[in-house]
Image: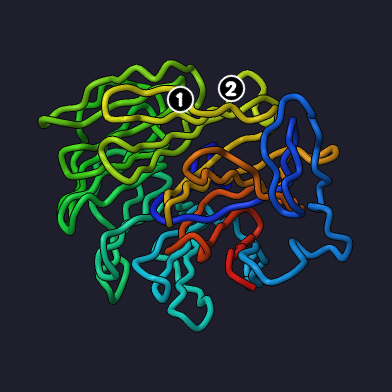
Amino acid sequence: MRPLRCAAWVGCGALLGLLGCLMNVDENLWTYDAASCKKPPCDGGVPDGRIDSGPPRCRWAPVSMETEADLNAIWGSSSSDIWIAGDHGAMFHHTGSGWKSVAPVLDRDLYAIHGTAKDNILAVGAEGTILRYNGTAWSAVTAPGNAILLGVFAASSGDAWAVGSSGAVYRIQGASATQETSSTTATLRDVWGSSPDDIWAVGDGGVIIHFTAGKWSSATSGTTARLQAIAGTGPADVWVVGDCTDKPGRCPSTILHYNGSAWSKAFTTPDGVSLKALCPVGGQVWSVGHGCCGNSCTCDHALRYDGSAWSSAAFGHADTLEGVWGTGSCDLWAVGNDGTVLRYLFQ
């Protein structure tokens, strides 16, 4: 299990039974409604125990995996080239005909994965671990220190960033990485950019830092929430999700948006929702994590933004989701604890 961070971003997917003030739109979609304060059932209202049922449409379904490892991140260069990274160096590769296990390079937990192409992929994790895939094999990248690296973003084929504990920021160029001076000592949990000279990182205490004009500087977030993930579609459309620190798992999560000039609060979830990852795709934005259902606060959860409002996809699956990725509005994957893999397709 990764230490309180969101999975790597780029592409997306998600799910779960939402706790809080929600209005039932249909059997699998719930939207926030403070007036009615209705709660969906933990099983999403499906009597036969499946994640979803009914006429053909886009829906989430579980994918069988031969592992019980916690899966922390997912990224792909296409629908036929997808990677999953997890605890103890676990890696799985999908080439269009099912998932295959890949022998670990190191027995260290991996928390994030991202790339620019099928032959340029990076994964990062515990003890300063940085791995690079060249299209044939994974190899270790020499890095200073042993920070816990929680986020990675490949800006180009030869330039990437990794962030982690105690404000660690590494710039990865070629076969080595150098430590950069950041403007914070807070744990940084994710990193994303619209270009090599427009990079954002987010972390604990509402910290947001921005790399532009060759240096890092602090930005005002307007929150003290633990910010878990960041992703966007361009320099004037960036999203951040985070959760609270006073009652983790029992209080609201915050969603922020950047419009090119300032950050603002876009949405606050009901109590009990903790968002860990997000991803814009197909004109939508998905965020996944966990929420409360019954006496458990480790049920899969996903929120979806359709361009005008946030809503919740609901079903019952008692594991936290850590990562999401996809190629379109109806072709998504999500991964999580205990080997959980879910796919969103028309079926």
Helix, strand or loop under label 1: helix
On screen, residue 275 versus residue 24, left or right, reads left
On screen, residue 197 versus residue 205, left or right, reads left
Q: Which residue is mark 1?
A: 204
Numbered mark located on residue 245 in the image: 2
Q: Amino acid at mark 1?
A: Asp
Tell me residue 66's x, y (percent): 63, 73
Residue situated in front as seen by the camera: 261 or 161? 261
Going 74% across and 62% down the picture, which residue do you hit? 52
- Sort mark 1 into few (<14), some (14-19) or many (20+) by Cα contacts within 10 Å: many
Helix, strand or loop under label 2: loop
Q: Is residue 78 above or below residue 163?
A: below
Mark positioned earlier in the residue sequence (1 or 2): 1
On screen, residue 17 versus residue 128, left or right, reads right
Cα–Cα gap, marks 1 and 2 = 9 Å
Tell me residue 251's x, y (percent): 67, 25
**Location of residue 273 by image quarter:** top right
Q: How was this image coloured?
A: rainbow
In contact (CB < 8 Å): disc 1 and disc 2: yes
**Location of residue 62 by image quarter:** bottom right
Q: Amino acid at mark 2?
A: Thr
Q: Is residue 31 above or below residue 215?
A: below
Tell me residue 22's x, y (percent): 73, 35
Quarter of the image where the C terminus is located? bottom right
